[in-house]
Image: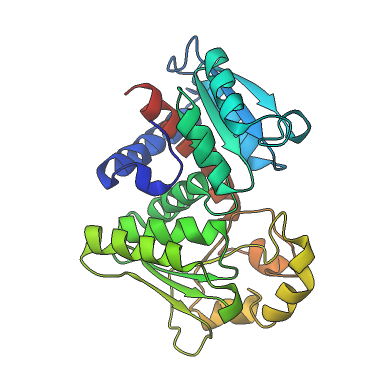
Amino acid sequence: MNFLTLSDIDKDSLWEILRRAKSLKELRTQGISRLDVLSGKIIALIFEKPSTRTRLSFETAILELNGNSIFMGPGEVGLGKREAICDVARTVSRYVHGVVVRTFAHKNLVEFADNATVPVINALTDEFHPCQALADVFTIWERFESLDRVRVCFIGDGNNVLNSLLLASSIFGFKLDVVTPKTQRPAREVLDKASDLSLRYNGRVVFEVLDNFDSLGTYDVVYTDVWVSMGQEAQAELKLKDFKGYQLNSSMLERLGNPVVMHCLPAHRGQEITDEVIDGPRSVVFDQAENRMHVQKALLEYIWRR
């Protein structure tokens, strides 16, 4: 099976992965980190975008599941440039037992997965970041021990992280209010997909996208991300202008009821978030980063034990 968006796995199975991630995290704190799950398996990591947490968390997870990984960086890949995507997928499938892909256009990932004969995991595209969202849900659940009554506010860009968070909210049922400028809203197709999922799992739409702060209340969690994502540098000047007043600072945190603070990193300190907030007592940013590894470990186990 492939994991390209959160909707590729049903809700019950996603909960199975989260519960397993909790067990794996507890085992690791007890010094039990090596499990014989991927013994004899080789996982290729094909990354066309730079990475710190994604690469380290996946390589560590694979190693602790007794598997092996092979990393191929931007200079070695060139999907659709050096070689047709379908040819790369077919060839790589002859060598390894699974592929983790971090690339630009989501359609390239879909084409790769359609032509691969081994499982493919989305480690980030310009449209979706499902592994991040699953770790985010785990972090919220870990903190509040439930998702039913949790209220989350996302302040920032309608990017891949928000797209996957919208799907996560719609599947797991936590309330999500999004505040983003009209010019930076998520794509209509993403909102429609999230609405369909929300109606299926909750009987109602559990998220709302707003372009101002007027109707916001108090929240359990506030989440922000960079305003200018990788590959969007040409839009930086316009985006920084659009996001004036959207910074997550102490004043904004107090206005929202002093919620728990999340950020998927890397952070542009002093831009979308201030030092006193990301380093403050309400921040779970680095727990969130650590949880990428535990959740991806559980995801890998789920895929290869099926």
Quadrant hosting residue 72: top right
143 or 150, nearer to the observer:
150
Q: Residue at x 50, y 66 (%)?
A: 187
Q: Residue at x 60, y 68 (%)?
A: 157
Would residue 177 be visible to someone looking at this image?
A: yes
Quadrant hosting residue 149: bottom left
8 or 38, nearer to the observer:
8
Query: Residue 33's x, y, as percent?
Result: 50, 23
Colour scheme employed for the rendering of this structure: rainbow
Would residue 293 appear left or right of 198 to someone viewing this image? right
Quadrant hosting residue 54: top right
Q: Residue at x 43, y 83 (%)?
A: 217
Q: Is residue 219 above or below residue 159?
A: below
Which quadrant would the N terminus be assigned to in this image?
Answer: top left
Would residue 63 be visible to someone looking at this image?
A: no
155 or 180, nearer to the observer:
180
Query: Residue 118's x, y, as percent?
Result: 46, 23
Query: Residue 296's x, y, as percent?
Result: 48, 35
Which quadrant would the C terminus be assigned to in this image?
Answer: top left
Would residue 241 appear left or right of 107 to someone viewing this image? right
- Give the residue at the far bottom of this rendering: 214
Would residue 275 appear left or right of 147 to someone viewing this image? right
Tally of numbered tags:
0
- Give the residue at the far left of this rendering: 203
